[in-house]
Amino acid sequence: MVAILENVPALPFDDYCAALDAELDQPGARRRLAQAEIARLNAFENDIRAFVSYRTDIPERHDNPRHPLAGALVGVKDIILTRDFPTRYGSPFSENEGPRRDAWCVQRLSELGAQVVGKTVSTEFAFSRPGATQNPHDRRRTPGGSSSGSAAAVAAGFVSFALGSQTGGSVIRPASYCGIVGFKPTFGLLPLDGVHPASTTLDHLGLFARSPRDAWLLTNSLLAGGAQPLEPMKPRRLLELQVPDSIPLADQYKRHLEVLAERCRVSGISIESIELPVPVDDFVHLQELLCYWEASRILLNVPSPRLTPELAGLLEPYLAIGLDAYADARRKRQTYQSLFDGILQDVDAIVMPSAIDVAPEGLGHTGDAALNRFWTSLHLPVASIPLWTGTQGLPLGLQMIGALGRDRELLACGEWMFRNLGQRT
């Protein structure tokens, strides 16, 4: 599998652009990067299968040519509407094609001069039934899900950025498995117009990039045209959340976290260990109840055939769960959000593993989201930072959880960690 990852652009997109400051024709230089990515896509897409549909005849764009994202190649998850490509929601039923219009995020990319290459593979309606995508680090292993193709496309060097979504762990876990940055912003920060819903309480637009600074470049560009640059910020205080014993965290993750804590202290960063202040069952299952209760009413409220029997069977039991249980889960969600608002008041981030281990073998599943679901329920900004390698050189990510609305600060701290404390340094 080394061949798949050879010659992936060595620099994150924003670093590459900064290195072009002395060049007179930056858009032309960025086009050369795009051409190199298209060449990789042509060479290796049949192996990785990151895309449902794509184009390689990228037209030269002249609108907004000096924007930081001008000429950047982007993949878009197949639950997000696009005018130029069909949207099939990761479903095997072709009649599920969505309307041909651009979602808000896709329209913004176009306005900024970025180039949408195609639609990336999603699990069925962003749930558990996997598509054909393989992990670029080892094609026998899952890339994670549900944003499978988006993570793999960035990791394989086919695009500089990709859009995904997260309702449980669909950005953070694939980013960890594929060795790139995944970012789930504060709930509601990025509009979901044109993104197929699964759970209105939990759905987030997310994204993949090669560095935390790149992740902020894309996020801020979508929101404000890229007017707020991001510089690395050394954290002052971190809290390391101890993974409950009932969750089977790999020993190699534990060793990496021990080394990280020591390196933080040597660097002058306060890092304290804390235990989970809520019931373990709620940590694992709160998101599941909210998600499946809402999804059963969104996805099953349409005439068949629409869902595979597997997905329908997963959701149907939740139609029988009453409003009282759902309301109780919503109250717990709000109580726990307030609790963690207080915990994060004077903390730069909570840190913990992005997944329980490296990407597992097999393509019939997408891995365990036990360490991601809770933070999605709390609407907090979360990033997976590719700090380490584990078994057979496979990636392991650090999950960083920030306070509500402090997305920029979280990624600035993540950028410092990425540059200074990873195994890559």
Image (tube, rainbow, N blue to C red):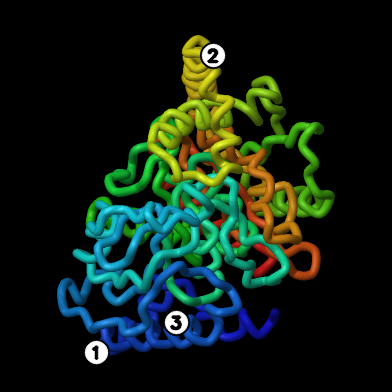
Asked if labels 2 and 1 touch by Cβ distance under 8 angstroms, the answer is no
User: Which label belongs to residue 46?
Assistant: none
Q: Quadrant of residue 273?
A: top right
Extreme top residue here? 324
Residue in view at x 36 percent, y 58 percent = 87
Look at mark 2 in the image and give the residue it sits on. 325
Work out whether mark 1 precedes mark 3 in sequence or the reverse, and give the earlier one. Answer: 1
Q: Which residue is mark 1?
A: 24
**Closer mark to the observer between disc 1 and disc 3:** 3
**Residue 36 in view (yes/no):** yes
The relative height of residue 55 versus residue 279 in the rendered view (above or below) is: below
First in residue order: circle 1 vs circle 2: 1
Q: Quadrant of residue 207?
A: bottom left
Amino acid type, residue under disc 2 in the picture: Ala
In the image, what residue type sits under mark 3?
Answer: Glu
Give the residue drawn at x 38%, y 69%.
118
* Residue carrying label 3: 37
- Label 2 secondary element: helix
Figure check: 379 above or below 384: above
Q: Residue at x 75, y 61 (%)?
A: 361
Disc nearer the start of the sequence (2/3): 3
How far, Cα to Cα, is label 1 from label 3? 22 Å
Q: Nearer the viewer, residue 324 or 3?
A: 324
Give coordinates of residue 255: x percent, y percent: 81, 52
